[in-house]
Image (spheres, helix red, strand yellow):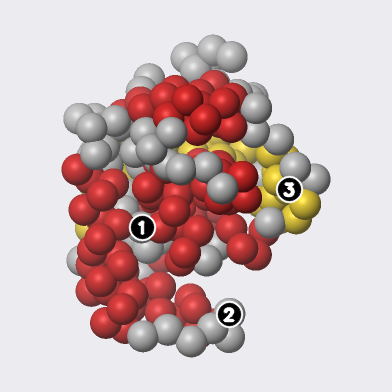
Amino acid sequence: MNQNTISILAIDGPSGVGKGTVARVMAQKLGWHLLDSGAIYRAFALAVEARGVDIADKSALQKIAQTLDLEFKTEQGSELVSVFLEGGDVSKILRTEQTGEMASKVASVGVVRTALLKRQQDFAQAPGLVADGRDMGTVVFADAPFKVFLTASAQERAKRRLKQLQAQGTMGIMSQILAEVVARDERDCSRKNSPLKPADDALIIDTTELSIDKVIAQVSELIKA
Ligand code: DC
């Protein structure tokens, strides 16, 4: 893979900011591939849980990360439809708050991040890639020509998450979701390995007051320019 010859749009930001939606729409618009890097960390967390491994056991975590049997099923080359871990469909459990929380914990381990790096970089295929996560613009695709960092207040992100849960028919309590969002921010931003932060050359978009269409318009402008 040569990141310099493949167009890459890196989209980073905290949980619940809408990165996934923006990435999906942009990948469709551009006809590029899509990498949901959070799904890799989530699937890894499920594999760790299934083996009953202590998250302090770094060498066991490293081994699991290096041999992770993970398959993404996509539609039209970009839309992520299902995720299979060791042959089993984990698409639903992958998206729960609990899995996100576990993912955030195991993702702070340096040897895990190193072991999962190439797997993410291999998604860079012609004609281009839209990659969303926490360190797409700073580490995984540091040479990407297009970088966006999305932000929104924790209150607004918790509100969006609650709406999303309700749309899926799941109950949620605003105060609890807000506390989870804040705790996850704290962990993802303060970790030593690849902390969540904007790349120096990223376009920062505060989406608190913006509709998804407005965000897409700003990102599209960046690509055109
Ligand atoms: O984007 P998400 O909510 O699916 O990610 C779940 C967790 O995985 C997130 O809290 C931190 C971790 N993660 C990461 O450390 N680096 C990434 N590039 C993507 C996710």
Residue 41, x across and y down, in percent = 50, 43
Query: Element at badge 1?
Result: loop
How busy is the neighbourhood of tag 2: few (under 14 within 10 Å), some, or many (20 plus)? few
Quadrant hosting residue 27: top right
Q: Could you tell me which residue is drawn at 32 percent across and 49 percent down?
A: 13
**Secondary-structure class at tag 3:** strand
Q: What percent of the width, then of the height, locates residue 145?
A: 38, 26
**Label 1, residues with CA under 10 Å away: few <14, some 14-19, many ≥20:** many
- Tell me the quarter of the image containing the N terminus: top right
- Sequence-earlier tag: 3 or 2: 3
Is 56 on the left or on the right of 31, as rendered?
Answer: left
Tell me if the residue at label 3 has its CB under 8 Å from ligand 1: no
Q: Ligand 1 within 8 A of label 1's CB?
A: yes
Say which label, 2 or 1, has the lower sequence index.
1
**Is the residue 5 above or below the residue 192 in the image?**
above
User: CA–CA distance between discs 3 and 2?
Assistant: 21 Å
Q: Is residue 142 left or right of residue 6?
A: left
Q: Label 1 is placed on what type of residue?
A: Ser
Identify the residue position indicated by label 1 in the image: 15
Left/right placement of residue 90 relative to residue 102 reads right
Given residues 53 and 191, the one toward you in this image is 53
Query: Mark 2: which amino acid?
Result: Gln
Disc number at residue 84? 3
Disc 3 to disc 1, C-alpha distance:
23 Å
Judge whether 21 appears above or below 73 on screen: below
